[in-house]
Image (tube, rainbow, N blue to C red):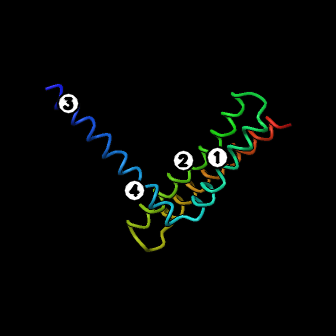
Amino acid sequence: MLNQLSHLFRRRILNTLKFSWDGLISAWKSEEAIRIEVLLFPLVVLGAYYLGPTKVEQILMVSSAVLIIIVELLNTAIEKTIDRISAEQHPLSKTVKDVGSAAVLLAIINFAVIWIYILI
């Protein structure tokens, strides 16, 4: 019984990782913003490592960049869902997409505020 549970757990984890990987690849292929953010991420990590005075501040600096990528992925999922529902222009579709875009903007502002606060 324990062996079956262990096998199911491993299978569940592997499936979850595969679906997550598929999502990352899909976002990479379809969204320029994701590609830019992911390509800039190593520079952010290096900048945080060399410019962040403490480990906690370095973690905050890197985490603020991770947050941008997370919110961008969620925004992409929202946009793709709206596009799947209907190709026709609709005020509610515009509102939903605009709110997702606003969330990305707030994540970017959060990044800027954290970096400015730590570096000044």
Give the mark, 2 or 3, whose residue is nearer the N terminus: 3
Could you say which disc has been placed on residue 28 in the image? none
Q: Position of residue 74 (x, y in %)?
A: 50, 51
Q: Residue furthest bottom?
A: 88
Quadrant, the N terminus: top left
Alpha carbon distance from label 2 to label 3:
31 Å
Q: Provide the residue designation for mark 2.
A: 70
Secondary structure, mark 3, is helix
The count of marks equals 4
Mark 2 Cα-neighbour bin, 10 Å: few <14, some 14–19, many ≥20: some
Q: Provide the residue designation for mark 4.
A: 22
In the picture, residue 23 is in which quadrant?
bottom left
Give the mark, 4 or 3, whose residue is nearer the N terminus: 3
Q: Provide the residue designation for mark 1.
A: 107
- The amino acid on which the numbered mark 4 sits, given as a three-letter code, is Asp
Q: Provide the residue designation for mark 3.
A: 5
- The amino acid on which the numbered mark 1 sits, given as a three-letter code, is Ala
